[in-house]
Amino acid sequence: VEEPQVSARNMLQTVKHKKMGEIKIQGIPIKFDSCDDNLKLPPPLHGEHTAVILKKYLKYDNKKIKQLVKDKIIEIGEV
């Protein structure tokens, strides 16, 4: 995008994605003088944080998570 306003507001940023390499994604639209608006992480892969959320917030153990994967209810990376 060759729009001066997009460039001036840092609205397109390049991040390193695990599978796709360097990609351009939308930056943070709301700007504050006291905050860094550079993106730190790329978008997550499908199911990348599922196990962590199930463990941390729902207190699921590995056995229950593996059963959900086996039953094709969720998709995740490693458990």
Image (cartoon, rainbow, N blue to C red):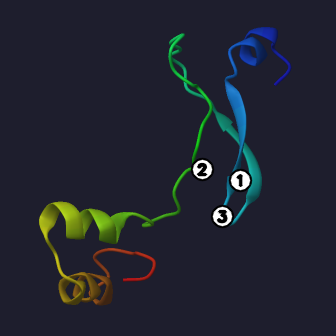
Q: Residue at x 43, y 82 (%)?
A: 78
Give above or below for 7 relative to 44: above
Proximity of marks 2 and 1: CB atoms separated by less than 8 Å? yes
Circle on res. 36: none
**At label 1, which amino acid type do we have?**
Lys
For marks 2 and 1 on the same chain, the one whose residue lies earlier in the sequence: 1
Q: Quadrant of the C terminus?
A: bottom left
Q: Nearer the viewer, residue 61 or 5?
A: 61
Circle 3 SS class: loop
Proximity of marks 1 and 3: CB atoms separated by less than 8 Å? yes
Q: CA distance from mark 3 to mark 2?
A: 8 Å
Q: Residue at x 54, y 20 (%)?
A: 29
Q: Provide the residue designation for mark 3.
A: 18
**At label 3, which amino acid type do we have?**
Lys
Q: Quadrant of the N terminus?
A: top right
Proximity of marks 3 and 2: CB atoms separated by less than 8 Å? yes
Circle 1 SS class: strand
**At label 2, which amino acid type do we have?**
Pro
Circle 2 SS class: loop
Q: Residue at x 71, y 29 (%)?
A: 12
Relative image position of residue 76 (x, y in whole percent): 41, 75
Q: Provide the residue designation for mark 1.
A: 16
Q: Provide the residue designation for mark 2.
A: 42
Q: CA distance from mark 1 to mark 3?
A: 7 Å
